Image (cartoon, grey):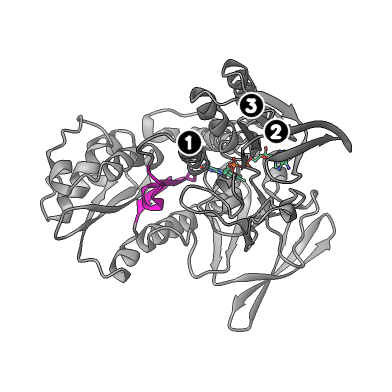
Amino acid sequence: MTHDLIVVGGGPGGYVAAIRARQLGLKTALVEREQLGGICLNWGCIPTKALLRTAEINHLLHHLEAHGFSAEAVRFDLAKIVARSRAVAKKLSAGVKFLMKKHAVEVVDGQARLAGPGRVVVERGGQGVAELAAPHVILATGARPRALPGLEPDGERVWTYKEAMVPERLPGALLVVGGGAIGVEFASFYRDMGSEVILVEALERILPAEDEEISALAHKSFAKRGIRIHTGATVQSLQRAGEGLTAVIDLGGGSLSPVTVERVILAVGITGNVEDLGLETTRARVEKGHLVVDQWLATDEPGLYAIGDVVGPPWLAHKASHEGVICVEHLAGVADVQPLDVHDIPACTYCRPQIASIGLTEAAARAAGRNIRVGRFPYQANGKAIAMAEPEGLVKTIFDADSGELLGAHLIGTEATELIGGFAIAKTLETTAAELMRTVFPHPTLSEMLGEATLAAWDRALNI
Ligand SMILES: Cc1cc2nc3c(=O)[nH]c(=O)nc-3n(C[C@H](O)[C@H](O)[C@H](O)COP(=O)(O)OP(=O)(O)OC[C@H]3O[C@@H](n4cnc5c(N)ncnc54)[C@H](O)[C@@H]3O)c2cc1C
């Protein structure tokens, strides 16, 4: 054996697993074929958040009158905006390289493939560069965009998230296909930067994983911003037309609507990177494009584990990292390791207004037969939100009516993605409504809404 553990893939799942393994004294190798940090740091979470921050600033610069400013002829340089986003990604990827060195993780640059139990061969440019062996192998190979027949990305006019992140110029009109978190973030970014945006979602509502009330509020807010949204709709065909594209949108019920746009962004989900991994030499199973694992992230092949996007939803960086830690601690025999509870994983969408949630939606709680109490507290009743000139939004809580257990929390509004952390702690600690009601939140802060939305569930909110 050359190592105690081999990790394939250096995204937030793989690199965090490798660090935890080193902390536990395991001799660890990490194989990465592209850039350390994976999709998250290089082409996902981080560069999009840099762009969305820019979009937020652009929005503010055009709404300065609320704060007593006036500014004319505010301009931006798209090349500089993209360059900043890329620089942020590069800095963080370099940060992972530093962390690997600091923790003495042996990084192998190349494409890894399983070659029998505990054996991994690494190639670069078609040449073998390493043969590794370990009793434990973790696959953290991530995922890639899913394509729809007839809607294949061409890298030029039909974009995936990668091209959408590095535009050379701002499209005048843009069609975003897919109303999940990624589609909505790009719709929000491009609209704030000045593009005409059409958003098409096949399901009945945008952000379908979110609480219905929150996705309805998001829909209303985006529509007010001029984003044209079609739900229950699909793109029937896409054809090049002059410099742009003509898309025929099937609005349902036989109604077809042609639109001409300059660019299309496809955001219709992702599929796991399970190919060319040598899985045929193992007993590991793949279902619906993802590796099947148990609660300890073990595949059906002894000693072979998988974490992060390659094992399926929710496709989130923090889920990948936590799975990495749990997997390594369990295989290393650490006592008291807990499996990850999907209801304790927060999900955030960094559009404007921001959306964040954790746990059961109201509909899911009712469908599960829970006797629930629902609390709602609007941003417009919060002093800090008004002082910030950000009164749009809602904090919604779902509690078990009998035990007071926090079952879910759903937010839309400024800094919702920061606020959800409070509910994440509360949920993980199995905090009850009574304990949340006793919690002293500082005034004036947006966080006061966490307390108020809890009180509201028992008709005791103080400021509405
Ligand atoms: C546009 C966009 C925005 C996003 N925003 C957010 C967000 O705000 N918050 C959030 O939580 N999540 C977000 N995500 C999702 C997040 O990026 C993923 O959930 C996360 O990156 C998954 O981590 P991972 O380690 O499983 O895989 P990845 O980050 O995909 O890393 C996998 C790595 O494995 C490498 N690899 C694959 N196969 C091999 C092989 N055979 N040999 C060697 N190396 C290999 C790849 O090169 C890659 O670096 C976003 C995604 C996108 C696309």
Q: Residue at x 31, y 68 (%)?
A: 368
Rendered position, 60 above or below 183: above
Per the rendered image, the range of residues in magenta is 338-359
Query: In the rendering, at what x and y percent does residue 284 appear?
Result: 64, 55
Q: Quadrant of the N terminus?
A: top right
Who comes first in sequence, dot 1 or dot 3?
A: 3
The alpha-carbon separation of the residues under discs 1 and 3 comes to 20 Å
Which residue: 61% across, 50% down?
310
Q: Position of residue 362 (x, y in %)?
A: 31, 63
Residue 464: tell me if it is visible: no
Three-letter amino acid code of the residue under disc 3:
Ser
Q: Residues within 10 Å of mark 3 (few under 14, many from 20)?
A: many
User: Is residue 461 or residue 229 the one in the foreground?
Assistant: 461
Relative placement, left or right, of 301 versus 65 is: right
Q: Amino acid at mark 1?
A: Val
Mark 2: few/some/many CA within 10 Å (<14, 14-19, 20+) = many
C-alpha distance separating marks 3 and 2: 15 Å
Question: Is residue 353 found inside the magenta-colored segment of the image?
Answer: yes
Q: Do labels 2 and 1 touch, CB within 8 Å?
A: no
Q: Quadrant of residue 167?
A: top right
Quickly name the residue at label 2: 31
In the image: residue 400, left or right of residue 156:
left
- Picture quarter containing residue 63? top left
- Residue at 78% of width from left, 38% of height from top? 121
**Can you tell me whether the CB of the residue at mark 2 lies under 8 Å from the nearest atom of ligand 1?**
yes
Q: Given this view, does label 3 or label 2 mark the residue nearer the observer? A: 2
Q: Is residue 55 above or below residue 27?
A: below
The answer to whether the residue labelled 3 contacts the one labelled 2, judged by CB atoms less than 8 Å apart, is no
Q: Which mark is residue 325?
A: 1
**Residue position marked by numbered label 3 in the rendering:** 93
